[in-house]
Image (cartoon, rainbow, N blue to C red):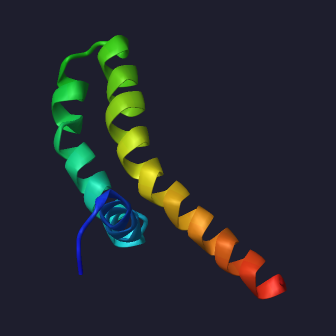
């Protein structure tokens, strides 16, 4: 199979859009959580929540949700 950009995008989306990936990303985000707490800065904590945790964890969850909605839509047709 020739790997072009469309095939690569489908492969990446298929693996990133899983709860396993969401858990892995949550674990990666939580690695930096203690240092965000130790900074005693609300700005650093808000930045950690918005940039690290939400973006890393919500990406696979949103992709998974889109996949579930697409499958449900296909079944209705």
Across and down, in percent, residue 58 comes to: 47, 49
**Residue at 34% from the left image edge and 67% from the top image edge:** 7
**Residue at 58% from the left image edge and 70% from the top image edge:** 67
**Residue at 18% from the left image edge and 37% from the top image edge:** 32
Dividing the picture into quadrants, the one containing residue 33 is top left
In the rendered view, tell whether residue 7 sits above or below residue 29: below
Across and down, in percent, residue 76 comes to: 83, 84
**Residue at 39% from the left image edge and 67% from the top image edge:** 10
| 52 vs 60, nearest the viewer | 60
Q: Tell me if 12 is positioned left or right of 62 in this view.
A: left
Across and down, in percent, residue 28 comes to: 21, 50
| 1 vs 35, nearest the viewer | 1
| 45 vs 38, nearest the viewer | 45
| 22 vs 42, nearest the viewer | 22
Dividing the picture into quadrants, the one containing residue 75 is bottom right
Q: Tell me if 32 is positioned left or right of 22 in this view.
A: left
| The C terminus: image quadrant | bottom right
In the rendered view, tell whether residue 55 sits above or below residue 23: above
Across and down, in percent, residue 25 comes to: 29, 54
Q: Tell me if 55 is positioned left or right of 4 in this view.
A: right
In the rendered view, tell whether residue 17 sits above or below residue 38: below
Dividing the picture into quadrants, the one containing residue 44 is top left
Q: Tell me if 9 is positioned left or right of 74 in this view.
A: left
Q: Residue furthest front?
A: 2
| The N terminus: image quadrant | bottom left
């Amino acid at each position: 199979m020739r790997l072009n950009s469309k095939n690569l995008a489908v492969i990446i989306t298929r693996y990133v859009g899983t709860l396993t990936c969401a858990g892995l990303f949550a674990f990666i985000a939580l690695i930096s959580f203690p240092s965000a707490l130790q900074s005693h800065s609300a700005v650093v904590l808000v930045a950690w929540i918005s940039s690290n945790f939400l973006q890393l964890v919500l990406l696979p969850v949103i992709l998974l949700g889109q996949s579930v909605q697409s499958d449900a839509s296909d079944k209705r047709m």
